[in-house]
Structures are given as C-alpha cells and as structure tokens.
Image (cartoon, helix red, strand yellow):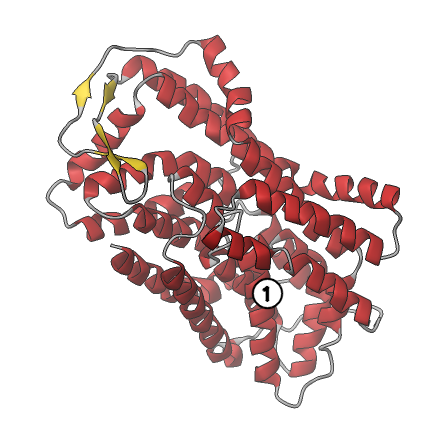
Amino acid sequence: MRLRLPHPLVLLLGGVAVAALLTWILPAGAYDRRLDEASGRELVVAGTYKVTEAAPVGIMAAVLAVPRGIVAGADVILTVLIVGGVFALLDATGALSRLVGSLVGRTRRPRLVVVAVCLIFATLGALENMQEEIIALIPVLLVLTRGLGFGAITAIGMSAGSAAVGAAFGPTNPFQTGIALRFAELPPLTQPALRFGLLAAAVTVWIGYTILMIPRDDQHPEVTPPAAVPATARDLVLFAMVLLPFVPYVIGVMYFDFGFNELSALFLVAGFGVGLVSGRDLSTTAADLLKSMETMLAASMFIGVARAISVVLTDGRVIDTIVHGLASPLDGMPGTAAAMLMIPIQSLLHIPVPSVSGQAVLTMPIMAPLADLLGVSRDAAVIAFQTGAGLMDMLTPTSGALLAILLIAKVDFGRWLRFAIPGTLLVALVGIAGIVLAG
C-alpha cells in the first residue's frame, strides 16, 4: 500500500497544534543573549539556559497564531506573491518557451548546447526559484535533446536539476536564501564572495555530472514536437525585463540596506512593464498579474502557517528549551561537524514540508540560535539549510512539480533517482565546504 502524506497545509497546521501541545509538556526556559556590536543582532550565550515561568498556549491562542504568523511574515509573503507572479506572467506570454525552442536544431556542438541550457536554468533558479514553470517547457526540451542525440534524463537534468542547484545556492534567491537569512536574523546578502563562489562551484559540478552521464541516458520517449514558433526580439526584451530588477536590488543590498520591500517594489514595476511590452493595456496587465499571483498563493500560505509555529513556541517560552535539547547531545562535538548534521535534518524535513520557503521560516528560528551555541556562524546554518532542503527539491516524492515533470517526460521516479542521487551528493560536497568556510 502506497503511503500518502496529508496536504502540506494540513501538516503545517498540525505542526501549530503540536507546537501548542509542547508548550504544555516542555518546561519553559530561556538563554541569556548578548548584543553583537559588529552585526547588531542578539546572540545566544552558551551555558546560560535556565527554567522560567510556564506560559502554555491554549486552543484559541494557537488558532490566532496563524493570522499572527501571516502578519509577521507579511514582507516575505508579499515578495513571494509579486516576484513569483511576475515570472508566471512572463511564462504566460510564451517568451520562455519560444526562447528555449529557438535552440532546437543547433546541434553542431551538442554538449555546448547542454552547458548553455544548464546555465540558463541555473540562473533562473538562482534568481526566482524556478520549478513549476519548467513543466510547460518539457515538451520543447525533449525535442531539443532528441535533436542533440540525447534522452529525457538529460532534458530533466539540464532544466529541473540545474534550476534546483541554482535555487539552492543562489545568493539572491528570495524564496530560499533570502527567507533563510531573514529568519536567521542576518542581512539580505552576507559573505557575498563565499556565496557567489558556492553557486559557481555547485553549478559547475552539476553541469559536469550531467554531461558525464549523457552516455547512460537510456530514456528516449516518443514526443510530438510542439508547433515551432520562432523567438522574437520582444521575447528577449521581456526576458531581460524580469532579470533587470535584480541589478539594483543587489546593489541596494550591498550599499543601501535594501530588503524584501524594495525587491517587491522593483518587481511590481517590472510586472507592469512585462504586461505593457507584451501588448496588454494597463487594466489587462493588472488583471493578468493578479491571476499570475494565484500560482504563488499556496507557497505564501505555507510561509505564514510555518511562521505561526515559531510564534506559538516563542509565546510558550519553549523555543530555547528545544534549542537546548538539540544542543546538549552535540556538546563536545566540533561545531563545524555538528553544523553538518543540520543537512540531513533539513533533507528529511523537506519530505513532509516540500515548500522551501515554508521550511526556511519553520526551521531557521531554531537553527540560528543552535548555531550560536555550537560556536559556528549563522551563515553556516543557512548554508546547511540550502544544501539539505534546496537540493532535496529534485529528490522529494512530495514535490508536485517534480512528479509532473517526470510524468510529461515519461521517466520513472526510480530511474530519475538513480541519476539524480549521485549528482546531488556531489553537489552537497560544495555545501559542506561552504559550512567549513563560513565557520
């Protein structure tokens, strides 16, 4: 009998109930905290945990924690809606499909085409956590790889696989790294040289692995070529318009203290620009942009409900107790080695919580102070999250987008895992190196 997990929203709401129950079972406690003058944030002080007065959370307070969590994560939720909506609007114009389709027939150096496509999808993953948008592109990609003499595994590896790797290590990905940094109480772009270096290394490893495995790609399904529609100059302009906001955003993060609100504002302008350039008027653009945001509603709700869990644990004064319980067995272990154990924890959590955004909100309020106690930087905890949860996006059986991609490509899930697991483990070594370097 096949195990079927409840809907992620049901699991997260159950998590709120469990969190409330824990406030009645676990002793309330707290660590002392000190202000770090260099970063301006409060750090947990090891060895200062003490039991405090109990503050159990009742049923009504637990229910109220859900809207409170949504309000507390409003800036993150709005960014997910707007940024995701703009990319969904771009996808609705057909520009992405036509641009990918324009590569069909360019077979003189097939492996260079694979490298180019990998880089495109890794970039899109790093910028906007691309996943669901790939579903509609699979028929075009299958035609492309067949023309190159390759199979369906290569098509998925250079699209969904590359996007997952780029999304996991993208320093400016607002859906993963950005949210994890926000709830680890870190600036939007810390250690940029390290983070961009990890992105380059991870993508390079994945591209090399994908090319190395091409001769073993035995999946060659019959596909009906979609109608060939040539890409236009307007398609390139539309594509450039959704990438452009990241330029002032990165500059703003580094020099002007930009955050999620500024990113949302930049993409709101870009969204209307995409609509107008694609031939829509203002009213139609507004309506289509709102419709595109509907695709991100589930992810936004996951973020709010996951935030409600930490709200309950904080109100019940047991979040430090949980951190203390996690830290005690690791006492005496080298901090870096202990931080590496966060990777399998995050990986396993990603099966019942397939939303990376929701998982970041759920886990970082616990993992960040745990990093303080382990004597490693909070950046190391964030990199462990990126490696564990981010890379699991191409392995978890609870990912609807991944299963849809495999279904369209006619690739069995087990066959995909035989390809993806070794490559994922190789890329995870990059994340482990990042934890060591972030120290």
Residue at the disc numbered 1: 121
Q: In this view, does 216 lie above or below 406?
A: below
The residue positioned 35% from the left and 64% from the top of the image is 430
Residue 239, quarter of picture: bottom right
Q: In this view, does 390 lie to the left or right of 71?
A: left
10 Å neighbourhood of mark 1: few (<14), some, or many (≥20)?
many
Q: Nearer the viewer, residue 209 or 126?
A: 126
Residue 52, quarter of picture: top left
- Tell me where residue 138 appears, x and y as whole percent: 68, 63
Q: Residue furthest front?
A: 256
Which quadrant is home to the C terminus? bottom left
Q: Is residue 92 above or below residue 103?
A: above
Residue 123, visible in the rendered structure: yes
Residue 223, visible in the rendered structure: no
- Tell me where residue 171 appears, x and y as whole percent: 46, 56
Q: Dot 1: what SS?
A: helix
Q: Residue furthest left?
A: 332
- Tell me where residue 410 appears, x and y as whole percent: 65, 62
The kind of residue tagged 1 is Phe
- Tell me where residue 73 appears, x and y as whole percent: 52, 31
Q: Is residue 20 left or right of residue 407?
A: left
The residue positioned 39% from the left and 51% from the top of the image is 388
